[in-house]
């Protein structure tokens, strides 16, 4: 296995990503655009999710594919970002055909970044609809990571969070890509150190090349969370997309999303808490033209977990300092 050419989710053929952010707001939106409708599923394991149109992604429900996915800051206000993306897709003529009408299918998930030091006094209507529309206008195969898009104002327990991405090309010929906005209650780093929990999966020094600390700090076995420093501790949630070019059913895509959550557990301590809305969308573009054999699907699921862990570490590693930050960036410490 090796990273793809960009080491981004857009190494999966058929996908583009766009970001829009507002630095005074310390929040933003990220869009995953499907060049053609893609099979999709979702798995939620956090106790405090905020979502739009996720029920239709269950395997037993009618709609099989989506046009785009949205990751947004802004807590429940950020769900309006999908409205802006939907408007842009409608202008393109995209969407699920219902008689003479087309309804763009745009599931979305949000993270809580309302108390991160940014100005949230936006008046009657939030800015997220326009940020969603702008993010769709910005889609491409190359995009920035770190303090951009949905990761603009993200935080972890110890450092700033951010938008991360990674990819893996399997020996079986399939490509897996991950995209994640890291705003976890817990920490991506080990104890008081700058070493990442995801270190065993790192490729080519992509998040600092520090490995795991030696000797391993005894205190690292005790979870570090936002509750330790800030009793409110509710500005949380890690939201992500795992994607592949394999041909998958909705049920198989859901299994891929479940497997990708193992990457959360490998890269964040703790993960999936009652105060996180941890969620993974799965996309299968089918651009490889191949359906994985059972043993290949196991390899695909393992790669999904490893790639997600790497993307989480990269999101924290790539964050940059901004005025008004309440936590340091990893690179700035």
Image (tube, helix red, strand yellow):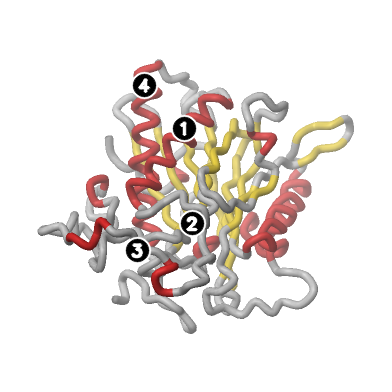
Observer-nearest of 144 and 22: 22
Q: Which residue is identified by label 1?
A: 256
Q: Which residue is identified by label 4?
A: 296
The residue furthest bottom is 323
As drawn, the label of residue 181 is 2
Mark 1 vs mark 4, foreground winner is 1
How many neighbours does mark 4 have within 10 angstroms: few (below 14), some (14-19), or many (20 or more)? Answer: some
Distance in Å between CA atoms under marks 1 and 4: 12 Å
Observer-nearest of 274 and 80: 274
Marks 3,4: beta carbons within 8 A: no
Image coords of residue 226 (percent x, y): 43, 67
Mark 3 vs mark 4, foreground winner is 3
Mark 3 vs mark 1, foreground winner is 3
Image coords of residue 174 (percent x, y): 39, 29
Indicate whether 28 appears above or below 58.
below
Observer-nearest of 288 and 312: 312
Q: Earlier in the sequence, mark 3 or mark 4?
A: 3
Distance in Å between CA atoms under marks 3 and 4: 36 Å
As drawn, the label of residue 224 is 3
| Quarter of the view holding residue 114 | bottom right
| Quarter of the view holding residue 146 | bottom left
- Identified at 49% across, 66% down, the residue is 154
Q: Earlier in the sequence, mark 2 or mark 1?
A: 2
Image coords of residue 74 (percent x, y): 62, 65
């Amino acid at each position: 296995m090796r990273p793809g050419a960009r080491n981004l989710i857009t190494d999966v053929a058929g996908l583009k990503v766009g970001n829009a952010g507002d630095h005074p707001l310390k929040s933003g939106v990220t869009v995953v655009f499907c060049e053609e409708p893609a099979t999709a599923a979702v798995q939620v394991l956090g106790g405090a999710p905020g979502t739009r149109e996720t029920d239709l992604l269950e395997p037993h429900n009618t709609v099989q594919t989506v046009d785009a996915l949205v990751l947004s800051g802004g807590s429940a206000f950020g769900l309006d970002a999908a409205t802006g993306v939907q408007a842009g897709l409608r202008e393109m003529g995209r969407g699920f055909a219902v008689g003479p009408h087309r309804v763009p299918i745009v599931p979305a998930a949000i993270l809580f970044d309302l108390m991160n030091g940014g100005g949230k006094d936006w008046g009657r209507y939030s800015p997220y609809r326009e940020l969603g529309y702008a993010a769709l206008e910005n889609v491409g195969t190359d995009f920035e990571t770190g303090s951009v898009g949905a990761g603009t104002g993200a935080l972890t327990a110890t450092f700033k969070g951010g938008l991360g991405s990674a990819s893996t090309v399997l020996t079986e010929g399939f490509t897996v890509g991950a995209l994640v906005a890291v705003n976890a209650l817990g920490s991506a780093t080990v104890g008081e150190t700058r070493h990442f929990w995801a270190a065993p999966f790192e490729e080519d020094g992509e998040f600092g090349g520090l490995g795991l600390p030696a000797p391993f700090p005894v205190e690292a076995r005790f979870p570090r969370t936002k509750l330790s420093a800030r009793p409110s501790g509710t500005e949380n949630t890690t939201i992500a997309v795992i994607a592949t070019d394999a041909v998958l059913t909705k049920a198989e895509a859901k299994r891929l999303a479940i497997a990708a959550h193992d990457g959360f557990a490998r890269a964040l301590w703790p993960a999936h808490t009652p105060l996180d809305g941890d969620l993974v969308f799965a996309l299968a573009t089918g651009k490889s033209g191949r359906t994985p054999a059972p043993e290949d699907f196991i390899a695909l699921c393992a790669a999904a977990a490893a790639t997600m862990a790497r993307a989480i570490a990269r999101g924290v590693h790539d964050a940059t300092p901004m005025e008004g930050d309440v936590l340091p960036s990893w690179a700035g410490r």
